[in-house]
Image (cartoon, rainbow, N blue to C red):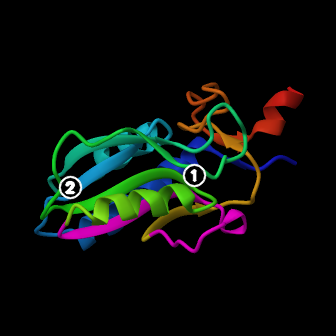
Amino acid sequence: MAFRIDEEEIKSRVKELAQRINTDYIGKEPLLIGVLKGAFIFLADLVRYLDIPVKIDFLAVSSYGQSTQSSGEVRLIKDLDHPIEGEDVLIVEDILDTGLTLSYIVRLLKDRNPASLRTVVLLDKPEARKVEFEADYVGFKVPSVFLVGYGLDAGERYRNLPYITEIEALKRD
């Protein structure tokens, strides 16, 4: 049986994450930074459940290219549009696997002197970790398999699926 997270499970968990963020950021106006392209759906759904005022920006990095495995080299493709000095920053990422991408982004942004810097990930693959990294907010712990859907892709395909599943399950269909 292939691993799968259904649309309703995702919706429920995103709401729970938003409630925690609402509580943790009372009296603040965090800057949510979506990591393109994978996190765009998660970010869009997350902000709909936030009751606090927020600002949004995006950056894009690449460590996969067209492969299903990380190259281990992270490249900045699109930088932020605005400075973050003094801001309460929350990085919104689709998946934490090797830890290379998020540790790179955190190092990059810490140098820009935000007031605070936290991370929220929809999916966490602890078994795949190559560098030590723990997200502040985690939607689901998942097995170390290649997942697609809900923003996650394989060669730019499958992002539009409303659920998350193993790529192998789609190849069998």
| Quarter of the rendering occupied by the C terminus | top right
Residue at left offset 55%, top offset 38%: 150
Earlier residue among tags 1 and 2: 1
Instruction: State the image coordinates of residue 56 (x, y, percent, origin top left).
Output: 23, 44
Disc 1 is placed on an element classified as helix
Residue at left offset 28%, top offset 52%: 32
Instruction: State the image coordinates of residue 154 (x, y, percent, origin top left).
Output: 67, 32
164 relative to 10 in the view: left or right: right
Question: For mark 2, what is the residue?
Answer: 51
Specify the segment rendered in magenta: 114-135
Instruction: State the image coordinates of residue 76 (x, y, percent, origin top left).
Output: 42, 43
**Residue 9 tag number:** 1
One can see residue 37 in this view: yes
Q: Quadrant of residue 144?
A: bottom right
**Residue 25 tag number:** none
Amino acid type at image mark 1: Glu
54 is within the stretch colored magenta: no
